Every structure is written in C-alpha cells, then in structure tokens.
C-alpha cells in the first residue's frame, strides 16, 4: 500500500489489526483506490503471524461507510470495460476480507450503506452502536448488488429479510438490524470502541488454530454438500490436536493459569 494512501489507515496492536476507512467528510465513501488498498491490507494482515484478529471500522464517528464513492462512477464506470476494472477491485477487496483465515470484526457506528453493508457482511462478527443504521439502496439507483454480497446477506438474515432489504431499499435502525440477525451486538456509542477492543483482545488470546478450524468448518457447513471440503476440515481438526497449543492449553488448565498460545 502506498504511503500516500491516507484514506485507509492500518495499525497493529497486541495481536489486533485495525483497518480504518478514513474519509469522514464523505461518510467514509470508498474510492476505487481504497478498494485496491483494502485487498492489499487484508493480505498483509493474513500473512503476519502476530495478527490474531482484524477489525474494520470507519473514522469520524458519523459513518462506518456510505458505500462506494458514486462521484467516481462518471469516470470509473463510464464504459463496460471501465466498469469491469472497477468491479474487479471491489470483488478482490471483499474476497480478501471474506476469505481471510483470521477472524474479522466490523465496528459499526452511524451510516452503514450500500457497499458499506457489503464490507460489514464480509466480516465474521458485526458490532454496532445504538445510532447505527443500515440500507442497501441499489433499487433507488438502478444498480445491482453483487452475487457474493447477496449470498452473504441471505446466509446471515435469510431470504425473506434479504428480499425486503433489497426490494424496499429503505433504511433500517440498528434494532431492526439486530432483530434480523444482521448485527451480533448493539452497544452505546460511547462504549462501542472500548467494547470492540476488549472483544477483539479476548479472541486474540484464544488458540489461533482452533479459531481458524472453526471459521473454515462453519464456512464449509454453509456450502452445498457436494461443494464441502471435508478433507480440509479433517486436516484442520487433526492439526489442533497435534499442536503445541493443545499441549499448552492442557498444561494451563492443570496449572490454573492463562494459556499462552503461539498458533503452532
């Protein structure tokens, strides 16, 4: 990622990697360059053994993200070729986020709209503040929501809620989003960041191989039976029991102390 990319900030602290959308004056609308940088950042986090958890959030307190920066569409999506190039960057960013083996959390405050919902859906866990609101207004813009994002939405909220969200294009309160299963937790605006910090650190102290196995097996369980990679699941299962972390977990339990997992 270029040092000039100030619209996307990254930080690594105590096993937690932070990915911050940083265009608060534009409600953290995501530019083409930011889509590219998101993919790069996630891949960097994925290969860093010190990173145990990834948190995605938006700066400024008013928005997680209002989605793609529509002001770029006149230029970036003016032709079918340009649209294909733009969509490729979006797909690569969301694929990197969805497919990373590290657990991911979306810290959501304020507006979470359109592509912002797509980014949140790409995370494993969504924690939102009481002032958060959600909308996918594609039907008001004449746009189509991508298949992978729709698949994630449907898996999380179910087909009936997914159809309602897409057909009406209306804005949903955080309470409605919680009732649909779109978010996992709702906390006050003042408590959001410290809550997520503590939540992420809790995950970071747990056994990385166990979390990786759980994440992958849950992903396989959501696939059609003939598409599931049972061999991979068996390998991940066996790797946990063959690991040094399993020995450390048993020893820590016997010695009544906190385990120190190494991901090995």
Image (cartoon, helix red, strand yellow):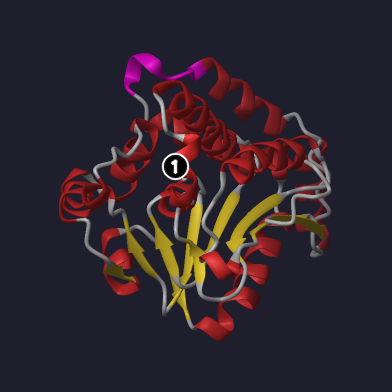
Nearer to us in this view, 15 or 90: 90
Nearer to us in this view, 7 or 125: 7
Q: Is residue 96 above or below residue 119?
A: above
| Quadrant location of the C terminus in the rendered image | top right
Q: Is residue 19 above or below residue 93?
A: below
Q: Is residue 238 left or right of residue 62?
A: right
- Residue at image position (59%, 41%) is 35
User: Is 134 inside the magenta-drawn segment?
Assistant: no
On the image, the x and y values in percent for residue 133 come to 36, 69
On the image, the x and y values in percent for residue 257 come to 82, 64
Residue range corresponding to the magenta coloring: 224-230
Q: Is residue 65 left or right of residue 21?
A: left
Nearer to us in this view, 175 or 168: 168
Q: Is residue 250 left or right of residue 80?
A: right
The residue under label 1 is 73
- Residue at image position (62%, 74%) is 193
| Quadrant location of the N terminus in the rendered image | top right
Q: Quadrant of residue 23?
A: bottom right
Looking at the image, how many numbered discs can be counted on the residues? 1
- Residue at image position (42%, 62%) is 112
- Residue at image position (42%, 32%) is 78
Observer able to see residue 17: no
């Amino acid at each position: 990622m270029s040092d000039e990319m100030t619209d996307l900030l990254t930080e690594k602290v105590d096993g937690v990697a932070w990915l911050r959308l940083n265009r608060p004056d534009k409600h953290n609308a995501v530019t083409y360059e930011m889509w590219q940088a998101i993919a790069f950042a996630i891949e960097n986090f994925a290969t860093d053994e010190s990173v145990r958890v990834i948190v995605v959030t938006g700066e400024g307190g008013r928005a997680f993200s209002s989605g793609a920066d529509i002001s770029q569409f006149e230029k970036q999506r003016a032709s079918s070729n340009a649209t294909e190039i733009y969509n490729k960057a979006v797909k690569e960013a969301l694929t990197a986020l969805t497919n990373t083996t590290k657990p991911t959390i979306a810290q959501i405050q304020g507006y979470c709209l359109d592509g912002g919902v797509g980014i949140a859906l790409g995370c494993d866990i969504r924690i939102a503040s009481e002032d958060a609101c959600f909308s996918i207004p594609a039907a008001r813009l004449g746009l189509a929501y991508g298949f992978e994002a729709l698949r994630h939405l449907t898996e999380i909220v179910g087909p009936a809620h997914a159809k309602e969200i897409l057909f009406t294009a209306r804005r949903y309160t955080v309470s409605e989003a919680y009732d649909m299963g779109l978010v996992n937790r709702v906390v006050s605006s003042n408590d959001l960041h410290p809550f997520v910090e503590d939540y992420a650190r809790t995950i970071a102290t747990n056994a990385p191989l166990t979390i990786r196995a759980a994440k992958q097996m849950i992903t396989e369980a959501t696939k059609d039976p003939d598409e599931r990679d049972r061999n991979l699941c068996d390998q991940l299962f066996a790797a946990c029991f063959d690991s040094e972390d399993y020995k450390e977990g048993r020893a820590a339990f016997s010695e009544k102390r906190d385990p120190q997992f190494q991901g090995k």
